[in-house]
């Protein structure tokens, strides 16, 4: 049967897939009223496999209205049980096989969507982390160490100049240590801080970060 896409539906990937009374009646070649009677007679049994919900189909053109017609929605387990209650005519058997394939196809589609959504969420999380400033990343990783950013900043200054903030202020008589740096050193400082941010995001401890950024300078204290 080529109409697999018209047999099984879902409202969202967090809800179970379902088929409807109209689909069952049409493709199994069973009178709709007969299907509805079986559902009414075994409603309690069917609801052991999940809540029975329904939609009211839009009235067709030329319809005179009247009482809304319920199109019951049955999940995979409910449909399986329903087929035990129906006559196994060749058409019913053929439709049952097609419906089983359709449920499987929908589950595969939902699984792929879940994987895609998870990957997208992971990418967004990674993007948010990358776009965070060094101070935000430091705060996130050491929330109970209020002076950690100052320690990290001093380490970055020492990598670039060999001096910490206090030493730079004293030596150059400035109120902000960055005022003591020339343009080349300021660019270097930003590169070092970006490297440190990436190391923090990769799970490095402070001592590991310190050893990495000071490597090659011969510095031992920061």
Image (cartoon, rainbow, N blue to C red):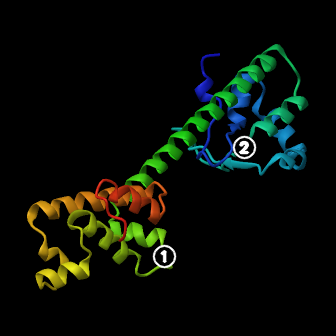
Q: Quick one: which residue is furthest to the top in this view?
A: 90
- Viewer can see residue 14: yes
From the viewer's perspective, is residue 141 above or below residue 26? below
Measured as percent of width and height from the top left, residue 164 is found at: 27, 75
Q: Which mark is residue 72?
A: 2
Asked which quadrant contains residue 196, the reply is: bottom left
Residue at the image point whose x is 63% and y is 47% from the top: 56
Residue at the image point whose x is 87% and y is 28% from the top: 86
Q: Secondary structure at mark 2?
A: strand
Residue at the image point whose x is 57% and y is 42% from the top: 114
From the viewer's perspective, is residue 126 above or below residue 163? above
Measured as percent of width and height from the top left, residue 197 is found at: 36, 60
Badge 1 density bin: few <14, some 14–19, many ≥20, Cα 10 Å: few
Instruction: Give the label, 2 or 1, closer to the camera.
Output: 1
Q: Secondary structure at mark 1?
A: loop
Measured as percent of width and height from the top left, residue 165 is found at: 25, 78
* C-alpha separation, residue under disc 2 versus residue under disc 1: 53 Å
Asked whether 181 or 190 is in front, the reply is 181
Asked whether 222 or 200 is in front, the reply is 222
Q: Which mark is residue 94?
A: none
Query: Could you tell which of marks 2 and 1 lies nearer the N-terminus?
Result: 2
Residue at the image point whose x is 40% and y is 81% from the top: 147
The residue labelled by disc 1 is 143
């Amino acid at each position: 049967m080529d109409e697999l896409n018209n047999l099984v539906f879902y409202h969202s990937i967090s809800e179970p897939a379902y088929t409807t009374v109209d689909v069952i009646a049409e493709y199994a070649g069973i009178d709709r009223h007969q299907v509805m009677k079986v559902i009414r007679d075994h409603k309690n049994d069917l609801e052991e496999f999940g809540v029975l919900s329904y939609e009211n189909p839009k009235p067709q053109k030329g319809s005179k209205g009247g009482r809304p017609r319920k199109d019951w929605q049955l999940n995979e387990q409910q449909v399986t049980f329903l087929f035990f209650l129906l006559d196994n005519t060749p058409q019913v058997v053929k439709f049952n096989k097609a419906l089983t394939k359709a449920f499987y196809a929908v589950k595969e589609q939902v699984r792929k969507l879940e994987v895609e959504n998870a990957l997208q969420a992971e990418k967004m999380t990674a993007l948010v982390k990358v776009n965070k400033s060094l101070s935000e990343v430091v705060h996130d990783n050491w929330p109970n160490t209020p002076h950690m950013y100052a320690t990290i900043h001093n380490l970055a200054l020492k990598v670039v100049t060999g001096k910490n903030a206090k030493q730079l202020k004293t030596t150059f008589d400035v109120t902000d240590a960055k005022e003591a740096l020339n343009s080349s050193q300021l660019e270097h400082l930003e590169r070092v801080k970006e490297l440190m941010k990436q190391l923090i995001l990769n799970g490095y401890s402070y001592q590991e970060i310190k050893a990495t950024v000071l490597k090659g300078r011969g510095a031992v204290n920061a």
